[in-house]
Amino acid sequence: MRQAGRYLPEYQAVRKKHDFLTMIRTPALAAEVTCQPVEILGVDAAILFSDILVVPEAMGMTLSYRDAEGPSFAAPVRDASAVGRLRRIDPSVSLAYALEAIALTKQRLGGRTPLIGFAGAPWTLAAFMVEGKSSHDAREARRMMYRDPGTLTRLLDETAENVILFLRAQAAAGADALQIFDTLAGLLAPEDYRRFGLPQIRHILASLRDIPVPKILFAKGQGSMVEELAAAGADCLSLDWQTDLGAARRAVGDRVALQGNLDPMTLFAPPERIRERVGAMLQGYGKGSGHVGNLGHGVLPDAPVDGVKAFVQAVRELSPSFHS
């Protein structure tokens, strides 16, 4: 969950020399920061250093990034004509830098650590595309959902097709697993998510069924729908920290693996407290395989590195007793 980032001094050293989008678009830099958490923290997998908004950019939107304001699009998608101007991507052209970053990262990892590729889910991407920037409530996208659901559905469907193309290209480039991030899923009521979130995710996962790598789904804020999410077609369901891990396991059984779900704020605690909370997380899942120890969302920018290291160490030391 967002391994490379501002909490690592080594990342900050690279960031001082290059802006965020330059780092993403420069394969050597992306590979360098992708590998930092593996080399510094000893985590069990690397996550490609990229951003979910590279797909809308490849579809024809103009993306900019300012440290104080975050990402933004110059011309948000607000009507059917704007949706019609979006293009079907060719990842080998418009996202070639990401695919090259995967190849370079795989070389650097040397087969000792798997690499996770990813993309944003259609609803989360569409929310950014309609808002034009980060939003705590996705007001414009939700307004479109009620006033012009046909246009929103068209945008979601077109975005889904491009996500499929990008994820397939990542797997072909060497990604060992693929994750779909629906970080704004919780902004929709469950009945709305069933109409404007899940159908496109099911379509993506069904379209990737022939690719022999694990697929992971993270739908933040929709823990009440864990059984429906588990049936969407992913191999692993990633849970936010507001979802009860034990209840989720009882609900889905052995149908999917579960990933998560420690509160990222726990990393600010003393090492002994982190260890205690990791133990409680593992106990919540219980005995048996099928659990990927992880946070319930990304590492926060100001999280102490020692806290992240304490988390990784605690999982390594405490989890063997739960293995079957």
Image (cartoon, rainbow, N blue to C red):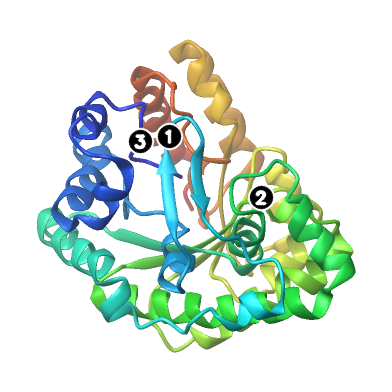
Q: Is residue 182 left or right of residue 250?
A: left
Q: At which x and y percent is residue 111?
A: 16, 61
Depth order, front residue of 246/71: 71
Q: Is residue 20 above or below residue 101?
A: above
Q: For residue 315, which numbered disc appears in the image?
A: 1
Q: For residue 272, which numbered disc appears in the image?
A: none
Q: What residue type is labelled 3?
A: Gly
Quote the CA–CA distance across marks 1 and 2. 22 Å
Looking at marks 1 and 2 on the same chain, the residue that comes earlier in the sequence is marked by: 2
Residue 202 in sight: no
Residue at the disc numbered 3: 5
Q: At which x and y percent is residue 102?
A: 23, 64
| Secondary structure category for the residue under label 2 | loop
CB within 8 Å, label 1 to label 2: no
CB within 8 Å, label 3 to label 2: no
At 17% from the left edge and 48% from the top edge, which residue is drawn?
A: 29
Residue at the disc numbered 2: 220
Q: Is residue 103 left or right of residue 63?
A: left
Q: At which x and y percent is residue 42?
A: 26, 37
